[in-house]
Amino acid sequence: MTKLFGGVGAWVLAVLLGSSALAQEPQGPFVRLEDLDVDAARLKEFKAAARENAVTTLQREPGALAFHATAEKDKPARLRVFELYADAGAYQSHLQMPHFLRFRDATAKMVLARETYDAVPVLLGAKPRMPAKALVRIAELEIDPARLEAYTAAVTEEIEASIRVEPGVLAIYAVSLKERPNQLRFFEVYADEKAYLQHLASPHFKKYVDVTKSMIKSRKLFETEPLTLNAKPR
């Protein structure tokens, strides 16, 4: 069974169909994005610490639902982190956990630059389980503010169809930046390159491209190498 993240309890995720959110609900899912530039000379050390922190976070924190990190292929020392929590309180609890504090202190000097974003879920679609290895693509889109509602409806329809009918589409997380709601980011997980190419050729994706091409002001696409993909099974 496939599910889409909607209202979230500590361990149970409700199915969200046919709706979207442009304002983060106080008790709804909380998404935090980070872009990190890591000292290349200490990248291996940082990655090991990051994997341990991600695994421990999912094991020990009921409110932590997903913790993914990936590196840009063209810039392997630039890491993209996607964190999903049951609510803002669960995220604040995470920041006080001993394993996170150890990770933060151990890696502080390894991080050369950090950009952190609060993100508002648009639609968070995922299969019940996340494999250890997969293909990850990241997209950054700027949408015409006057067309944002229409775009949200179109991308919601496309994500729902992709998760429902494509076995190789494992997750498509679509969020908007809280301070810039027409700036959207997508963290997409596919079983492999073949599954990604099949997705691009699917009727629902082609419909989405045709419907939204006039709504998108700019688009950046990034190929990445997964560092750690961790999500609680549902």
Image (cartoon, helix red, strand yellow):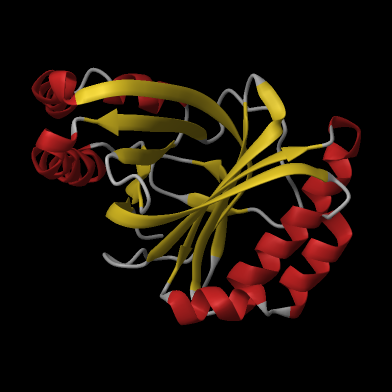
Q: In this image, 185 relative to 161: left or right?
A: left
Q: In this image, 54 relative to 168: left or right?
A: left
- Residue 163 at x, y = what percent? 59, 68
- Residue 49 at x, y = what percent? 12, 38
Quarter occupied by residue 218: top right
Q: In this image, 9 relative to 63: left or right?
A: right
Closest to the observer, 200 or 156: 200
The residue positioned 53% from the left and 73% from the top of the image is: 196
Closest to the observer, 89 or 195: 195
The residue positioned 14% from the left and 25% from the top of the image is: 107
- Against 49, residue 111 (above or below) is above
- Residue 63 at x, y = what percent? 36, 36
Q: In this image, 233 relative to 215: left or right?
A: left
Quarter occupied by residue 204: bottom right
The residue positioned 43% from the left and 65% from the top of the image is: 128
Placement of the C terminus among the 4 image quadrants? bottom left
The residue positioned 50% from the left and 31% from the top of the image is: 30
- Residue 100 at x, y = what percent? 18, 26
- Against 51, residue 27 (above or below) is above
Q: How many marks?
A: 0
